[in-house]
Amino acid sequence: MVLHASSPGAGSGGMIRVRIRSLLLILPLIAPATARADSDGYFCTGRGYIAWETRFDTLPAGHRLHVVRFSRAGGLVRSEPIPLEDFQVHAMSCRETSVELTGWTTRYTVDLLNPAQPVVTARAGAPGSADEPQRNLGHWSREGVTDLESDGAADEFQLVISRVSRRVTGGIEHYTVTQIIRRDLRPGDPRILEAIKVFEGVLRETVN
């Protein structure tokens, strides 16, 4: 079995009918810019923010940490991507004001206390990998809705992962969209007030 990852090209939206829960309500609010995570795409959440990492197979390799903050007063605020050294992430955790990423022999701490000037420090660590499975928001994610902790209600901000799978010649295509949304909490009102798309891609599964 072979897995192929790609991004939808022009006109591809018509070939897949998106029919998962509130996705149709969310899509009109999405900005066109999209971060396309690779097979890493690990993420973690802290009070008032979510962070995830991406790595692109370019020369030089582009490894970035992305952060979106959210609050009732400020809504959704996306920061500039933070450059990281090129390494394979084995674990990732969100602290109160920092994100820790563990590589095979190095641990990195990204201090987010000053959003405009994040500070990245590295220190040596014993070789190893994560003690528990890491959460993913890209191709290897699990479909579902995760409430994000903020200064408002528990379900005001959410991470929404939607997936549509369809059979194609020689295999199956899995179309995944991941978004951070802000919901209207008034009773009986399902509106989405804000949304940021953080991943969109097609994974093709073929059988030789």
Image (cartoon, grey):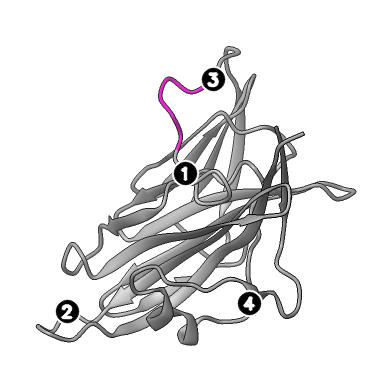
Between the C-alphas of marks 2 and 3, the distance is: 40 Å
Q: Could you tell which of marks 4 and 2 lies nearer the N-terminus?
A: 4
Residue 196 visible from this viewpoint: yes
Q: Is residue 177 above or below residue 188?
A: above
Q: Is residue 32 above or below residue 142?
A: below
Residue 146 is tagged as none
Q: Nearer the viewer, residue 2 or 70?
A: 2
Give me the residue at 73% from left, 53% from top: 169
The location of residue 3, given as percent across then percent down, is: 70, 40
SS category of the residue bearing label 3: loop
Residue designated by label 2:
185
Q: Could you tell which of marks 1 and 2 lies nearer the N-terminus?
A: 1
The extreme right residue here reads: 59
Q: Of the residues shown, which amino acid type is indicated by label 2?
A: Leu
| 170 relative to 78 in the view: left or right | right
Q: Nearer the viewer, residue 49 or 175?
A: 175
Residue designated by label 3:
129
Q: Could you tell which of marks 4 and 1 lies nearer the N-terminus?
A: 4
